[in-house]
Image (spheres, rainbow, N blue to C red):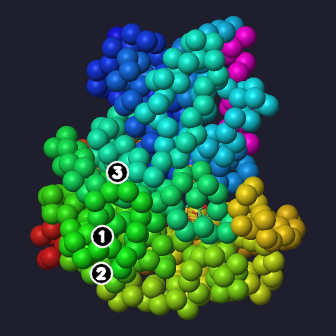
Amino acid sequence: MNNKDLIIEARQGEALADTTDATGELGKVYIESYGCQMNFSDSEIVASIMKQKGYSLTTDYNDADLILVNTCAIRDNAEKKVRNRLKTYNGIKKRKPDVVIGVLGCMAERLKSTLLEEEKLVDIVAGPDAYRDLPNLVDQVSEGKKAINVILSKDETYEEIEPVRLASNGVTAFITITRGCDNMCSFCVVPFTRGRERSRNPESIIREAKDLFAKGYREVTLLGQNVDSYLWYGGGLKKEFANLSEEEQGKSVRFAQLMEMVAKIDPLLRIRFSTSHPKDMTDEVLYTMAKYPNICNYIHLPFQSGSTTILEKMNRGYSRDWYKARISAIREIIPGCGISADIIAGFCSETEEDHLETLSLMDWVQYDFSYMFKYSERPKTMAERKFTDDVSEEDKTRRLEEIIKMQNKHSLLINKERIGKTYEVLIEGVSKRSEEHLFGRNSQNTVVVFPRQNFSAGDYVHVKVSECTSATLIGRVVDLEEIEA
Ligand code: SAH
Ligand code: SF4
Ligand code: F3S
């Protein structure tokens, strides 16, 4: 068993090292992940479970005995990509009939047995709450059966499973704090694929963060579909704080408190989180961010649409004015905070005026960057059942282009304003473009590139910015005395 066998591919096209031991006696598993950070984080749990079972990890699917594809169902094109991959993997069976192919994650949960029965693409189907069962499912396949577990749980958080850190730079890591989502935005498939919202025991979160810090990690990102609704009161499904008994309220932990607990681990451990929800993000969270220098000044606050009419149809639970008030609170409590968003172009019945409201909200906020999407109708969602997907493909494309154009303009403008300023940067590694340069991020989550000198990943440095692109700040490391002089 050499280290090469312990390499896994968790991001398409990138080989990722895991240097811990595994026996590999049951063969090699190849894991590929799609979708959001939570899915990548889940793949680290899956890797841990499979290693425990006796598998080693490989980055070469041709070499694998078990191929696991952790899938996303958020938009139709995400599923199309996965289908093509599954067809490729199925081709391997012609020369290697014993290879077992499993589909995990949100597409597995959405399509359930059709992937096994109608499409005959895979041997195993396992939903996001069924990963502990994977070793059994593999055994079932070796007994000649097709195996499926898509049962969603009310309390599974995999809390005591120590993830195998894949794609790791040894500096930054993700920690999942909630699973599922109870929000039911009308366009979104997540509540169907990930089930009910539940929060993870804070003790296990703190343990994981401390352990990462001890291993040299310097940044953790707390993950959940809606981190602001994190609420621990002893386990089980999410409840509203107001509905807890007095005793439960007394021992409960909410997101601001959780963040504070993680921030207190060590001033050298940076904290980020994703995703915040405009309807649930409290001032308490913002004040906690302002109080601890190691909680990064960056908030991802998706707004989806700038039109209150569309927001209502999306069932987002806030209006344009409410969203603007949240942005004002961020600006007031955390001056200079980086802000990003998710935006959907061409949702059902979106008019040109609605679209212009999206552009004008972008112009008012001036986001650092955004994830921008064309609306894609998803089966079973409220939008699919109640509304017509009536914006033409041409209009969706044009509106998305206008949104992207505006975002690029703002990203460049914001970065230009940063020229001449100095930022604390946590170094993540060597720049992709040049061996002579390192890269890291400032607190606002912007990538900063600078000459390598004698610095290395995991160091904190102060970088004075001299140039920029819309996505990157470029500068050089300076002494603090030099800045103060
Ligand atoms: N929980 C997060 C987002 C999760 S999904 C939140 O509520 O903000 C990530 C993003 O995908 C969403 O913010 C949305 O912009 C986009 N998205 C979700 N469903 C979509 C759909 N049907 N079509 C297009 N984009 C979608
Ligand atoms: Fe989907 Fe809305 Fe939940 Fe985000 S908050 S995961 S968009 S249902
Ligand atoms: Fe995709 Fe599931 Fe994440 S649908 S975005 S992988 S929660």
Residue 338 is at least partly visible in this image: no
Going 63% across and 12% down the picture, which residue do you hit?
144
* Rendered location of residue 55, percent (x, y): 41, 18
Considering the whole magenta stretch, tell me its main secondary structure: helix
Which residue does the numbered mark 1 point to in the structure image? Answer: 254
- Callouts 2 and 1 close, C-beta under 8 Å: yes
Q: Quadrant of ligand 2?
A: bottom right
Residue type, mark 2 in image? Glu
Per the image, label 3 sits on a secondary structure element best described as strand
Which mark is in front, 1 or 3?
1
Q: Is residue 87 magenta?
A: yes
For the residues labelled 1 and 3, the Cα–Cα distance comes to 16 Å
Q: Nearer the viewer, residue 323 or 137?
A: 137
Residue type, mark 3 in image? Ile
Number of residues whose C-alpha sits closer than 10 Å to that of mark 2, classed few (under 14), some (14–19) or many (20 or more):
few
* Rendered location of residue 320, percent (x, y): 59, 87
Which residue does the numbered mark 3 point to in the structure image? Answer: 175
